[in-house]
Image (cartoon, rainbow, N blue to C red):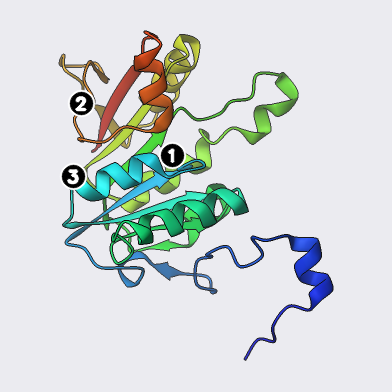
Amino acid sequence: MESEPSTEQKRRLGPYAHAPRLPEGDEVDLRHLGAGEWIELEIGPGPKAGFLLERAAAAPEALLVGLEIRRKWATVGDERLAKHGFGKHARVFCEDARIALPRLRPDGGVRRVFLHFPDPWWKKRHQKRLVMGDVFLTEVARLLQPGGELYIQTDVEERAELYAKVVGECDAFVPAGDVEGSPVVVANPYGARSPREHRAIADGLPVHRMTWRRR
C-alpha cells in the first residue's frame, strides 16, 4: 500500500496533489473507468470540463473520459462532474494525452474523440507541444471503432487549415462533413459546447468545425 504524502510533499505539490490519475500499468482498459454503453474521449477538457458536463447530460448512455494535463483543471473538472451527478459515467484524469493515449485499450473501443480549440501556442519553439501530430492521429486511429468519429473545432482559421491538411494526409480517416469529400460541418451536432465555443459564439467569432470517420 502506498504511503500518504508527507506534509512537505503536499506543500510542494499544492492543493491538487491528489488529482485523479489513470490506473498504473502499461495498459488501461477504458471500460473499467466507468459505466456506459459506448465510450467517448475528450482531449483537454479545460478548467471546468464544460463540454463533458453538457455532453454527460445530452448522452447519459455514454462513458465519457477526459484527459487534462493540468492538475488543477483535471481535479476541478472531475469534481464538477461528480457534483452534478455524472461521476459514474463521466471522468477527467490528469494526464498528458501524448503519453496516455498509447496506454489506452481496447483497440477499436471508442466511438468518438473530441478535440476542442487545441494548441494555443504560436511560436516555432512551441511546435513540439502541439497535441495534433503523428502520435495523436496514430493512437486515435487505433482506438476508434470503424466508422468512429474524430471531431475537431477551432476559432483560428489557419489552425483549421493545418488540422484539415494533417488529418487529410492520414489514410485512416475519411472526411465526414456536410459536403461529400470535405470534413467541414457548420453546426455542432453533439448537444454540448465547450466554454470557449460558448464565448466564440457570444463574441460573434466564426468557429471552424470538422469531422472525420475512421476508415
Q: Is residue 154 above or below residue 51?
A: above
Disc 3 marks a residue whose amino acid type is Ala
Q: Nearer the viewer, residue 14 or 66?
A: 14
Q: What residue lies at 22% left-to-right and 15% top-to-bottom?
A: 186
Picture quadrant of residue 104:
bottom left
Estimate the spatial distance between the alpha carbons at disc 1 and disc 3, rounded to whole Å.
27 Å
Q: Nearer the viewer, residue 164 or 75?
A: 75
Q: Is residue 16 above or below residue 145?
A: below
Q: Which element type, helix, strand or loop, lies under badge 2?
A: loop
Whether the residues at callouts 2 and 3 have beta carbons within 8 Å, the answer is no
Estimate the spatial distance between the alpha carbons at disc 2 and disc 3, rounded to whole Å.
22 Å
Q: Residues within 10 Å of mark 1 (few under 14, many from 20)?
A: some
Name the residue tied to disc 3.
58
Residue 169 shows in this picture: no
Name the residue tied to disc 2.
176
Picture quadrant of residue 198:
top left
Identify the residue at the far right of this view.
Answer: 8
Q: Position of residue 161 (x, y in %)?
A: 43, 13
N-terminal of the two: label 2 or label 3? 3
133 vs 165, left or right, is right
Q: Position of residue 48 (x, y in %)?
A: 46, 43
Name the residue tied to disc 1.
137
Q: What residue lies at 61% left-to-right and 48% top-to-bottom?
A: 70
Q: Is residue 75 above or below residue 182?
A: below
Q: Which quarter of the rendered picture does the C terminus lie within?
A: top left
Q: Which element type, helix, strand or loop, lies under badge 1?
A: helix
Q: Which of labels 2 and 3 is toward the front?
A: 3
Q: Which element type, helix, strand or loop, lies under badge 3?
A: helix
Estimate the spatial distance between the alpha carbons at disc 2 and disc 1, rounded to whole Å.
16 Å
Identify the residue at the far bottom of this view.
Answer: 1
